[in-house]
Image (spheres, rainbow, N blue to C red):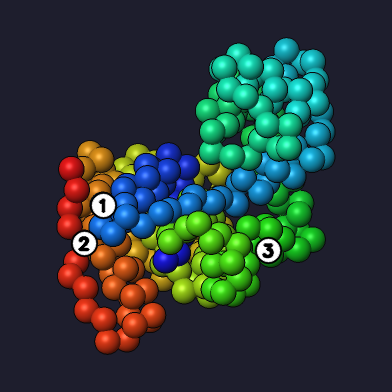
Amino acid sequence: ILYGLAGYAGVGKDTAAQEIANIHAANGGLRCRFVSFAAAVRRECWDQNESVEMPSGFTLPYRSLMAAFALALGITCDPRGPWDKALLPVYDELKRRVPSVREYHVRLAESARAVDPLCWVRRLLPSTKEALAEAMPDAHVVIVTDVRTADEAGAVRELGGMLIYFARPGVGPANLTENTTIEHMLDTHPAQMVLNSGTIEDLRNALLPIVSDATRKALCLAVPECRRPPVRAIG
């Protein structure tokens, strides 16, 4: 089962991803794996290791800056590349205190897309369902936590995935580019819409029928004569 989660930054996509995983774990013990296009961008930033300007005006190589913030937060910085979920607090703190880090991520991602619009899609997702299963054999469910473009949404849909768009009152696009990109994505690829305006329990209840539908479709593709009751609420 494949999900692609879309929406502006701050609408609760990561929280929703965890709730989807919780629902699947409670209904059949299905194992979930979280992946993101942003992780592929961070990996490339790590590999290129450009200098990043600090608010003080000094510059530091990207890897050195990552390692310093990871040390301050008591998190081990993997020398093979800091793109795993355990290092997300480091990125959050970096983006908050060093705005040029986010600018570096965006600049690198957009420059790569200008050369090859599908570059990040190919780095993250295989081109077939069979290849996806082989690439992530330990996961029954794969959740892409940050679908932002029509190409990324199209890749999720072509693999049989479900696209879910999240909105939250008072949360909008960070800039005109983000607004245009997400509007184009929604115009070209239908998505389940979830308004995240309440508690985590409210979000879970909104996700239950969506997860139930995705599970039923996946099972019926594998076993056409299958019949399975809706997933139950947890908590």
In the displayed structure, would residue 40 be above or below residue 191? above
Residue 55 x/y as whole percent: 69, 17
Q: Nearer the viewer, residue 217 or 190?
A: 217
The kind of residue tagged 1 is Ala
Q: Secondary structure at mark 3?
A: helix
* Farthest residue, direction bottom: 225
Residue 17 x/y as whole percent: 39, 49
Residue 220 x/y as whole percent: 32, 80
Residue under numbered circle 1: 26
Q: Is residue 40 left or right of residue 57?
A: left
Check if mark 2's residue and mark 3's residue have beta carbons within 8 Å: no
Say the numbered circle drawn on residue 122: 3
Check if mark 1's residue and mark 2's residue have beta carbons within 8 Å: yes
Residue 235 seen in this snapshot: yes
The kind of residue tagged 3 is Arg
Q: Going 70% across and 22% down the picture, which residue do you hit?
A: 67
- Tell me which numbered mark, 2 or 3, is placed earlier along the sequence: 3
Where residue 218 sits, quadrant-wise, is bottom left
Residue 163 x/y as whole percent: 42, 64
In the displayed structure, would residue 94 be above or below residue 110? above
The kind of residue tagged 2 is Val
Q: Quadrant of the C terminus?
A: top left
Q: Nearer the viewer, residue 164 or 128?
A: 128
Q: Going 63% across and 40% down the picture, which residue do you hit?
A: 83
- Tell me which numbered mark, 1 or 2, is placed earlier along the sequence: 1
Q: How many marks?
A: 3
Q: Going 26% across and 47% down the picture, which residue do you hit?
A: 203
Residue 188 seen in this snapshot: no
The local crowd at label 2, few if under 14, some if 14 to 19, many if 20 or more residues have their Cα within 10 Å, is some
The local crowd at label 1, few if under 14, some if 14 to 19, many if 20 or more residues have their Cα within 10 Å, is some
